[in-house]
């Protein structure tokens, strides 16, 4: 057998330098993009954990502030005299009863002493003719304070009275001498 022509390699030349540079550059760019994506994913995860931690911290801080405000309100209400006007806020915030009226000076005590309720009117008895029993005549009702809440004509507006603040401002006025 005879030797045939020598076998020639298909590509005996190298790729042009521009193509080689482009392939190496694209490979490096893809590798760097993968690294950047991994780093960004790590940072996003850390930030999400931080935000969730801050949410819990914010909730704790809000609860602490609300408790601090409740305690400050109770401290203020406990420095004021006992009375029905402040019972609702004291109950709402879980505060104490306030200063007993007996501990206040007599002049201040008179301002905060509850006013006695008017006695109900007694019916008049009109003498009846002989042989008939006496019948009581009803006395007209004493006009009472305006009723609050919805009524036949809708809610009645409560009259504004400057004395609503006196239970709060009078102790301050007495203690500090600053009167509003």
Image: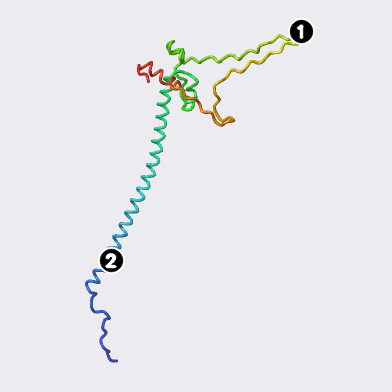
Q: Earlier in the sequence, mark 2 or mark 1?
A: 2
Q: Residue furthest top?
A: 130
> Whole-percent x and y of residue 65?
39, 32
Give the residue displayed 56% in from the left and 14% down from the top: 118
As drawn, is 122 to the left or to the right of 130?
left
Position of the N terminus, as image quadrant, is: bottom left
Q: Is residue 93 left or right of residue 46?
A: right
Q: Which quadrant would residue 125 be assigned to in this image?
A: top right
Residue labelled with disc 1: 130
Which residue is located at x 37 percent, y 48 percent?
Answer: 48
> Which residue position holds label 2?
26
Disc sitting over residue 6 in the figure: none
Nearer-the-camera pick, 36 or 119: 119
Label 2 crowd (10 A; few <14 / some 14-19 / many >=20): few
Residue at 42%, 21% in the rendered image: 168
Quadrant showing the C terminus: top left
Q: Give me the C-alpha separation between circle 2 and circle 1.
A: 128 Å
Query: Viewer-proximal residue, 30 or 5?
Result: 30
Name the image colouring: rainbow
* Residue 141 in the image: above or below residue 41: above
Q: Position of residue 74 (x, y in %)?
A: 43, 24
Residue at the limit of the structure toward the right, as seen here: 131
Between 160 and 129, the one nearer to me in the picture: 129
């Amino acid at each position: 057998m005879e030797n045939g022509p020598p076998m020639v390699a298909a590509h005996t030349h190298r790729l042009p330098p521009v193509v080689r540079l482009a392939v190496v550059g694209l490979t490096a760019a893809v590798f760097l993009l993968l690294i950047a994506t991994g780093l960004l994913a790590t940072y996003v995860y850390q930030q999400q954990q931080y935000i969730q931690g801050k949410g819990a911290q914010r909730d704790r801080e809000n609860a602490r502030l609300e408790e601090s405000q409740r305690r400050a309100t109770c401290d203020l209400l406990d420095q004021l005299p006992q009375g029905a006007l402040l019972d609702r806020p004291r109950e709402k915030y879980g505060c104490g009863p306030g200063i007993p009226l007996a501990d206040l000076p007599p002049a201040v005590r008179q301002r905060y002493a509850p006013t006695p309720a008017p006695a109900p009117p007694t019916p008049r008895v009109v003498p009846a003719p002989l042989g008939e029993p006496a019948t009581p005549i009803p006395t007209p009702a004493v006009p009472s304070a305006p009723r609050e809440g919805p009524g036949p004509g809708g809610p009645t507006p409560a009259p504004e009275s400057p004395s609503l603040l006196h239970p709060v401002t009078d102790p301050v006025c007495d203690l500090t001498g600053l009167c509003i």
